[in-house]
Amino acid sequence: MPSHDDRTDDVPTDTGWRVPADPVEPEPVSVRVVECVAEATGLDATDLDPLYEVVDPDALDALFPPDGPGGCRVGFRFAGSVVEVSGDGDVIAVTAPRVDD
């Protein structure tokens, strides 16, 4: 995963797509997760399954408040991507190959 020092704007990375937290115009992390996965997958955000089917958006937002860094790191799968939210609220989405059970 890219390092904390590599942050700029919403950018593709060599491993996926990164949406850094914006302290000037904070946005809930749940919104940034959907935006990041949409960019990583090339889909419109409205075409993704609802985030709440995978994780509780309110709980995710509570872990990463816009007014300060959270104290944890969370990872999960959503809409064909592996998503990681870091303690500073940055979101990284890496498209994952589908594995049939």
Image (spheres, rainbow, N blue to C red):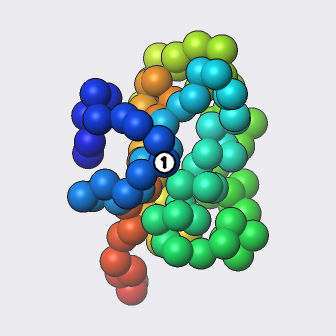
* Residue under the image location 58 percent in, 49 percent down: 33
Q: Is residue 6 visible?
A: yes
Q: Which residue sits furthest top?
A: 68
Quadrant of the rendered structure where residue 56 is?
A: top right
The image shows residue 16 at horizontal and vertical percentages of 35, 59
Judge left or right: residue 84 versus residue 48.
left
| Amino acid beneath label 1 | Asp
Say which element carries label 1: loop
* Residue under the image location 28 percent in, 27 percent down: 5
Say if 21 sits above or below 15 in the image. Answer: above
Say if 26 sits above or below 48 in the image. Answer: above
The image shows residue 82 at horizontal and vertical percentages of 41, 58
Image quarter (top left, top right, bottom left or bottom right) of the N terminus:
top left
Nearer to me, 23 or 50 = 23
* Residue under the image location 39 percent in, 80 percent down: 98
Judge left or right: residue 66 versus residue 9.
right
The image shows residue 94 at horizontal and vertical percentages of 37, 60
Q: Residues within 10 Å of mark 1 (few under 14, many from 20)?
A: some
Q: Exactly how many numbered labels are in the figure?
A: 1
Quadrant of the rendered structure where residue 12 is?
A: bottom left
Judge left or right: residue 100 versus residue 27.
left
Image quarter (top left, top right, bottom left or bottom right) of the C terminus:
bottom left
Q: Which residue is mark 1?
A: 10
* Residue under the image location 52 percent in, 74 percent down: 42
The image shows residue 79 at horizontal and vertical percentages of 55, 69
Q: Is residue 59 visible?
A: no
